[in-house]
Amino acid sequence: MLTVIIVIHLILAIALVGTVLLQRSEGGGLGMGGGGGGGGMGGFMTGRDTANFLTRTTGILAAGFMSTSLILAILAGGDRNQTSIMDKPAAVEQPVQPVEPEGPKVPQAQ
């Protein structure tokens, strides 16, 4: 089931990027939103119709993307046991005894 949701999530992500790139922006972009006489798709839809369609499509894809993100987050943390740091006793530190150094490690001349 997790694999199916991940595949749907990836498809939604790619489609969302595509619809955002197709929208007409002030700087141009890919600009399928139309320009002058009747739209960018051969007069099929006017510029305003294309913009409304792409805006609605972007919203639907974004809602689907967010919902699959939430589902994946819930499924990823679903098998964990809920614990609290207040349930664990505090760690008591043992005093450290100083260690006396040993003799030199290199052989000495006699």
Image (cartoon, rainbow, N blue to C red):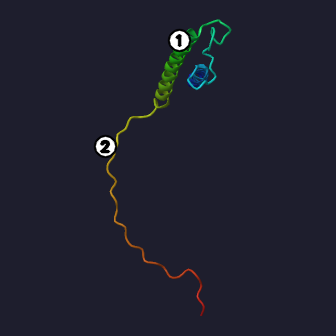
Q: Amino acid at mark 1?
A: Asn
Say left or right for 2 vs 78: right
Q: For residue 86, which numbered disc appears in the image? A: 2
Quarter of the image for residue 61 reads top right
Helix, strand or loop under label 2: loop
- Residue 79 image position (x, y, % from top left): 46, 31
Q: Residue at the spot x=50%, y=17% of the render?
A: 59
Q: Nearer the viewer, mark 2 or mark 1?
A: 1
Q: Amino acid at mark 2?
A: Met
- Residue 75 image position (x, y, % from top left): 49, 27
Q: From this viewpoint, which residue is outermost toward the front? A: 36
Measure the C-alpha gap from mark 2 to mark 1.
Answer: 53 Å
Instruction: Report the front residue among 73 and 98.
Output: 73
Question: Residue under circle 1?
Answer: 52
Mark 2 burial class by Cα count in 10 Å: few <14, some 14-19, many 20+: few
- Residue 14 image position (x, y, % from top left): 61, 24
Q: From this viewpoint, which residue is outermost toward the right? A: 42
* Label 2 vs 1, first from the N-terminus: 1
Q: Residue at the spot x=65%, y=6% of the render?
A: 43
